[in-house]
Every structure is written in C-alpha cells, then in structure tokens.
Image: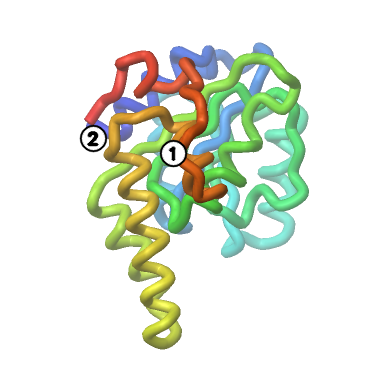
C-alpha cells in the first residue's frame, strides 16, 4: 500500500534497514492486528522488526522489548501499550502508522524521539479510516464519552490536515494561545507537506 511504501521510505531514510547501526525506530499502530501485520510486512521487506502489544504473553512482550533494547531489532511496531516508562535516548524515527485518538496521545508518544538531543523525525500518517478505527476503539461509554472522543478526533484531523506549523498547532492546542513562533523545522514550515 501507499502507506507501507511511505513507512519503508522513512525507515530507509533513517538508516534502519541495516541490522547494525545507531538508533532505533518505533512505529505505533492503533490495533494489535495492525501491529502484527505491519511488523510482518517490514520483516518481509528486509527490516529487523519486532512487535509489541498487550495481547501478547508476558514472555513474548519481554523478549520483544529485550531484542529492541539490545539492538537485535532496531524497529519496534507497537500499540500504545508500549511506552509508559520506556526511555530509549536514541529513537531516531517515530512513526504513527495510524493516527492516535488524541493530540495528547500523539504528543506523549512523539516525545519519545530524540531524547538524547540529536536530530530525530516524527511522522504522522493520516487517513479517514484512522478516525473510523479510533471510533471503534472508543465505542464505549455514554454520550459525554462520545462527545469527548469526537472532539479529540477533530483536533487530530485538524492537526494532520491543516498546512500550518505543527509546533504552533500543538502549542495552541495545549495553551489555548495562538501566538507561538513557527518552528521552521516541520513539514509545513519547510513546505514539504504531503496531503
């Protein structure tokens, strides 16, 4: 698919095809099934990729985490179950293969890239199907829960589709103030947005 081709291109650009080298990549997916299929496609394309989600046994999760930690796999495809308390300083690429359910989730997960202060890249892949997936995942609770879900998804859609500085959008979302300086680093600032 086009999304898989874009993922492979981003991983190649980050130098992740080699089994050795510096840096790691994390690819977030919204569902366990998608996590497994993306990891399998990456492996068949020649990448050293593992997968992690809460549906795996504790031993399988531990093995996937260890392989990633020691560099046997440089790419980990995961659901949001991977990440709390995880601190890898050398994540050079972080990809949301499917858009998350909120900008808060996106910001938290994207913040795992480049913790060593060296350049890192975050990529958000977005399509209308991602919103459908998120609605299914959050199809619990009453009307107020649904309203919160819809508001969160609208914010994600705005962030993904508006061609304006990503940092300005995030700052405005979290502070309610829209006068932040452009970052000059994101795809919108550089004029490289892919719609």
Graded by Cα atoms within 10 Å as few (under 14), some (14 to 19) or many (20 or more), the crowding at tag 1 reads: many
Query: How far apart in space, not on screen, are marks 2 and 1 (Cα)?
Result: 29 Å
Judged from the image, the secondary structure of the residue bearing numbered disc 1 is helix
* Residue drawn at point x = 38 percent, y = 50 percent: 156
The reply to whether callout 2 and callout 1 are in contact (CB within 8 Å) is: no
- Give the numbered dot on residue 183: none
* Residue drawn at point x = 38 percent, y = 19 percent: 189
Q: Position of residue 70 (x, y in %)?
A: 77, 29
Asked where in the image residue 31 lies, by quadrant, the reply is: bottom left
Asked where in the image residue 131 lies, by quadrant, the reply is: bottom left
- In this rendering, position of residue 106 left or right of residue 187: right
Query: Which residue is nearer to you in this view: 94 or 35?
Result: 94
Pair 2/1: label in front: 1
The residue carrying mark 1 is 169
Q: Quadrant of the C terminus?
A: top left
Query: Which residue is nearer to you in this view: 83 or 119?
Result: 119
- Give the numbered dot on residue 1: 2
Q: Position of residue 134 (x, y in %)?
A: 37, 62
Q: Position of residue 96 (x, y in %)?
A: 45, 40
Q: Quadrant of the N terminus?
A: top left
**Can residue 96 be seen in the rendering of this structure?**
yes
Where 121 sits versus 32, above or below? above
Judged from the image, the secondary structure of the residue bearing numbered disc 2 is loop
Mark 2 and mark 1 lie on one chain; the one further toward the N terminus is 2
């Amino acid at each position: 698919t086009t999304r898989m081709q874009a993922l492979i291109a981003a991983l190649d650009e980050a130098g992740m095809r080699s089994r050795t080298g510096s840096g790691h990549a994390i690819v977030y997916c919204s569902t366990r099934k998608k996590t497994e299929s993306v990891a399998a496609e990456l492996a068949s394309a020649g990448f050293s990729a593992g997968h992690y989600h809460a549906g795996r046994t504790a031993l399988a999760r531990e093995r996937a985490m260890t392989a990633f930690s020691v560099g046997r796999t440089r790419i980990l495809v995961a659901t949001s179950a991977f990440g709390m308390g995880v601190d890898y300083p050398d994540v050079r690429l972080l990809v949301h293969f499917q858009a998350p359910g909120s900008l808060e989730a996106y910001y938290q997960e994207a913040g795992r890239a480049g913790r060593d202060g060296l350049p890192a890249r975050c990529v958000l892949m977005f399509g209308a199907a991602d919103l459908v997936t998120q609605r299914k995942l959050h199809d619990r609770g009453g009307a107020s829960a649904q309203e919160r879900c819809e508001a969160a998804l609208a914010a994600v859609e705005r962030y993904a589709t508006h061609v304006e500085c990503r940092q300005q959008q995030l700052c405005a979302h979290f502070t309610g103030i829209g006068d932040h300086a452009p970052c000059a680093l994101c795809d919108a600032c550089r004029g490289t947005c892919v719609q």
